[in-house]
Amino acid sequence: MTSFTTLHAALQQYADSAPAQVAVAAQFLDFFHSHPDVFLRRHPPGHFTGSAWLVSADGERVLLTHHRKLGRWFQPGGHADGDSNLMRVALREAEEESGLVDLVVEPAIFDLDRHLIPARGAEPAHWHYDVRFVVRATASEAFAVGEESLDLAWRPVADLVTDEALDASIRRMARRWLARVAGR
């Protein structure tokens, strides 16, 4: 199966497993089929990105990055740059942005988020279709702050749910993670 086919199947599976997110998954599937360049930054309306819900080995904390350009705390992630394997993109971005090694990515989509990126310089406003995966730290959790970040921090997942300073999608993922851990 190609990465392209795998993403289509993963989006379908996500829609089946997250009833509250069926409309979002359908929007992602529509975008997926809209144009061959949806994995490239140059695609004017927007493009796919891959992100990591980067959890500690004990599953109680998540690593957030204080994004240099946007000045807000987010999960590690970035542009697909032509790679239709967004699970691989999420893992690559988690490694690059954290300096962590021995990370393990779970194959199922954890979250989907479509958000508008404001115009900046010559770059027009566009949409990010962000596909998010759980990535686990399995070795040292000592991170290294890279050039894309102002800072990194391990945050207790339970604290994120009510932190109004964070993006709503971070709070949503925190609630989803806590529900998943409680269900084990």
Image: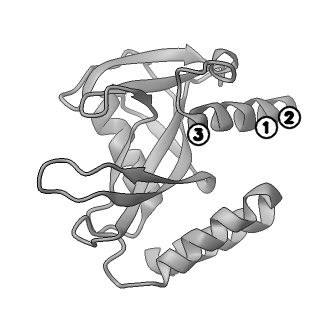
Q: Amino acid at mark 1?
A: Arg
Q: Amino acid at mark 3?
A: Ser
| Circles 1 and 2: CB atoms closer than 8 Å | yes
Of label 1 and label 3, which has the lower sequence position?
3
Helix, strand or loop at label 3? It is: helix
Camera-side residue of 117 and 153: 117
Location of mark 3 (residue): 169
Helix, strand or loop at label 2? It is: loop
Q: Residues within 10 Å of mark 2 (few under 14, many from 20)?
A: few
Dot in front, 1 or 3: 3
Of label 2 and label 3, which has the lower sequence position?
3
Dot in front, 2 or 3: 3
Q: x%, y% of residue 57?
A: 58, 24
* Screen quadrant of the C terminus: top right
Camera-side residue of 43 and 98: 43
Location of mark 1 (residue): 180
Q: x%, y% of residue 92?
A: 34, 47
Q: CA distance from mark 2 to mark 3?
A: 23 Å
Q: Amino acid at mark 2?
A: Arg
| Circles 1 and 3: CB atoms closer than 8 Å | no
| Circles 2 and 3: CB atoms closer than 8 Å | no
Query: Extreme right residue here?
Result: 183
Q: x%, y% of residue 174?
A: 66, 31
Q: Is residue 129 left or right of residue 97?
A: right
Q: Residue at x 79, y 56 (%)?
A: 20
Q: CA distance from mark 1 to mark 2?
A: 7 Å
In this rendering, the count of numbered labels is: 3
Location of mark 2 (residue): 184
- Residue 19, quarter of picture: bottom right
Q: Residue at x 76, y 29 (%)?
A: 178
